[in-house]
Image (tube, rainbow, N blue to C red):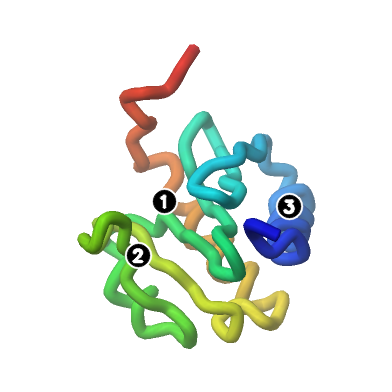
Amino acid sequence: MAYDEYAAERVDRILQSKSVAFEQKKMFGGVAFMVNHKMCIGVIKNELMCRVGEELQETALQQIGAKAMEFTGKPMKGYVSVEPDGFDTENQLEQWVNWCLAFNPKAKASKNRKS
């Protein structure tokens, strides 16, 4: 298993319960939930990849299981990785989804996006 499918199902259920239009896209060896054609939240291995924005990043990093998201050894601005103990309960997971959804309208779409 490349990613925790149960965690992805939980994220999917929350997005559906909020009537959010989204699509799932396989990337980074996991699955990303795209909202408005932008990566909003994802599951890689057994962790969440949360796009919360730079303004909320420090607050997010103080949460249980949260750490700086790193690709190629450099921290990614506005992204937080969350270990399973940080989204174990539905309330915890919903908070992460809410933060990601709140930032999504401000997020820039990838320059490589195909129309």
Q: Are marks 1 and 2 in contact (CB under 8 Å)?
A: no
- The secondary element bearing badge 1 is classed as helix
Q: Earlier in the sequence, mark 3 or mark 2?
A: 3
Three-letter code, disc 1: Phe
Q: Picture quarter containing residue 73?
A: bottom left
Q: Quadrant of the N terminus?
A: bottom right
Q: Which residue is mark 1?
A: 103
Q: Residue at x 60, y 69 (%)?
A: 46
Rendered position, 45 above or below 12: below
- In the picture as drawn, the residue positioned furthest to the top comes out as 115
Give the amino acid at mark 3.
Asp
Depth check, front residue: 2 or 114: 2
Look at mark 2 in the image and give the residue it sits on.
69
Report x, y in % for residue 4.
69, 64
Q: CA distance from mark 3 to mark 2?
A: 21 Å
- Describe the element under mark 2 as helix, strand or loop: strand
Q: Nearer the viewer, residue 9 or 17?
A: 9
Of badges 3 and 1, nearer the viewer stands 3
Whole-percent x, y for residue 22 in the image: 65, 37
Q: How many marks?
A: 3
Question: For residue 55, which quarter of the picture?
Answer: bottom left
Q: CA distance from mark 3 to mark 1?
A: 18 Å
Q: Residue at x 55, y 59 (%)?
A: 44
User: Could you tell me which residue is drawn at 73 percent across and 52 percent down?
Assistant: 12
Q: Is residue 61 above or below residue 97?
A: below
Residue 6 is left or right of residue 23, and the answer is: right
| Residue identified by numbered label 3 | 12
